[in-house]
Image (cartoon, rainbow, N blue to C red):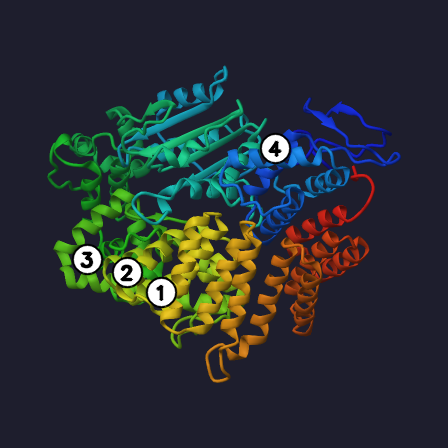
Amino acid sequence: MQREGDPAVSNCSLAHVPGDTVRQDRTGDQVTRGPGEGTDVLEVVALSALTAFLTAVGNGAAGEMGKQMLLSTGVLVRRTLGWQTPLPADEEGWQALAGQVYARIGGDPEQAREWARLVWSFPEPSVELLPAGGFPPSTRDFTNRQKVLRQLRREAGRPADGRPRVALLHGPPGIGTTAVARHLGGTLQNRFPDGQFYVDLRDAPGENGPEPATVLVRVLRKMGVSSEDMPSTSEGRGELYHRLTAGRRALVVVDHASAVAQVRSLIPATPEVFLLVVVSGGPLALAAERVPVPPLSDRYAVQLVRKVAGREGYALAKNLMPGLLAACAGNAFALRTEALRLQAEASAGGYASRRAEPSAGADDPVRGAVRGACERLRPQAVRLVRLTALGGWPCVDARIAAAAAGITPQEAGPMLAEASETGLLETMDDERFRYRPEVRRCLADAAGPQYGIPECTAAVERVLDLLLNRALHAAHAALPLSWRTEPAPEEGEACDGEAQGIEVLAAELGSLVRAVVVADEYRYVERALRLARALWPLQLKAGYWDEVLPALRVATDCADKHQPHSAMAGALHFQLAHCLGELKRWNGAEEAARAAIACERAYEHLRGEASAVELLGLLELAQWRHEPAYERFVEAESILSRITADQEGAGDLPRAFALAGRHRGRALRGMRRFTESRELLEAAADFFESRQEDYNRARALTDLAETLHEEGDDDAALTTIATAERLLTAAAAPHLRYLAGLRLRCTDGHRPE
């Protein structure tokens, strides 16, 4: 049932009013009905609703069904206008297209009927805002900050007056900005009953953090949006974010932001949403209430030390407190680290001793605290945390740390726990640890002078090898029959099936992307390329396009520089083209696809060349260029036919021809060559039935039903839809929703309420 105010669905309804009429829809726009035949005449959709629909399709969900709706819309556009129309490139283009379509259907009741059905069949988003987004708890030793909290609460609760509620919380590293944000969330639960959503950008690989589009993805995932429902464009994601939060009372926190662009799209358009941007460092040039976090005064610094160190620990340091306070300079991290030292010494029954410290202004308190924490660790543990810090890994576990230090995971685990007790590492929920950015930099800076470049380089190399081994096992498990994944290594831990393979790759994604960058920086070319190629299952089956994109860009550049015109270069350009295509960055996708074709052709790799040509055809098909797409699919089949029985890919030829035939059938539908389209799609469906590939058969049957509907045989289309529905499980919910909409387009009568 249509929801009021949903911009993606027309506000029109079926009419039973005889004759030509003009009325207003619920938005107040005039809706004209064409000349009628009796009393069962469909009204023409309003121009505003048509524009909203076309824009929503253009910015719509990624995944197979989002592309299917885009293709079906393009077919109807061509049928309505009578010529091949290029896919609009921006919002103005969609508006212009809506005007052209509206002008045509106003005098054509049959076309108007078809457009209204398509608009009404648009699968309504199943996304609902989750009431809780997993906001992290505050720390038990949170101290003071009442002035900062009052300022934040005042911004969160002030009258909106047409101004969005946005605050920028900032302060030097270690001062406690994250602790303030988390504590605020714990005190404002009643004010924001519709959800508190916290995203920490510090775990993103790279020094500059994720791109703005990726930040939107991460926030929307926190709000319950699945990969299938995730819009592919930044515009679509921003629209979904504002739709989900419209009229809601919610808190959105983005921690460790590094650029205004990362959060600009998150500025709320509704008065009861409060956006808090947290920066570790100087303030960003964001239009927001700026709330600096100052150093703790001596009074509250002492309170913090008491809370963390306990009564006995604090008693040990009474005589040393002035020097401790001066060295820490009100920095919460430094104070907490020193308090942990006092707590440990008290537990051991010792007494506090204080090394000479420089004055507060002469040294960075965080670096001083890190040096002090290292002095309290065993030398082996200090070596481990320093070498592990070198790669800039978003998170580490016992195996990564063991690889860095050249020891066993059984030895590394207790050392990580020991380092965590000193404050050098933060414990995560899944037996992993992470560094604060400033702590990691300090430890990494000390590694080279202490251990030498050869040992540091070897540490990074060992971690890269570990991550590559994990990735190869997981990728093979996720796609065991794919020629785009390497065989699993003989050594290492195997994954138990497809689901675990995807799970392992997703859990390690940040480290794997970082590993590609590190391998390229260290000029470990082969490792960089193989790591990037192992990400293929994540982009093919799990929709992590934004996250893998930085690694693919680095890897393709590396391949072009060191292994040009190779099969590996072709494979990586193919992955990049696929990724950009899923994100509807068409120009970059086509450029990458052509680069893949050139590489595969130069290497005389027929299977890879055919696949890349087919991908280019799919990109053209998605942009409503049906004739060029058809020619690409024919070309791909021609290349496949040159593969001999003893060449790579010979065993996969029947399936490859079936897929290419399906794509040809889809292109022919757009060209209105229905008989040929139907024959090819029926053949593809029969092939997948013989292979018991239910999902691929359902996809071919969905295409066939669309062709039958365009051809005017709705009875056959409905039978085909029913067959496709029986083949799908509940896990294919987006596909089932699409088929329900397609059924509506094939059925005469009223839109069900």
Q: Tell me the element at label 3.
A: helix
Of marks 3 and 2, which one's residue comes earlier in the chain?
Answer: 3
Where residue 64 appears, as percent x and y from the top left, is 59, 54
Labels 3 and 1: the sequence-earlier one:
3
Residue annotated with mark 4: 99
Tell me, yes or no, whether the two marked residues, 3 and 4, touch with CB atoms within 8 Å.
Answer: no
Q: Which mark is residue 344?
A: none
| Contact (Cβ within 8 Å) of mark 4 with mark 1 | no
**Callout 2, which amino acid?**
Ala
Q: Is residue 208 above or below residue 486?
A: above
**In the foreground, 3 or 402:** 3
Give the residue number, with chain letter if any, for mark 2: 519
Mark 4 neighbour class, 10 Å CA radius: few under 14, some 14 to 19, many 20 or more: some
The amino acid on which the numbered mark 1 sits, given as a three-letter code, is Ala
Residue shown at 56% from the left, 71% from the top = 656
The nearer-to-camera label among 3 and 1 is: 1
Residue 618, percent across and down?
53, 57
Residue 411 visible? The answer is: no
Which three-letter amino acid code belongs to the residue tagged 4?
Answer: Gly
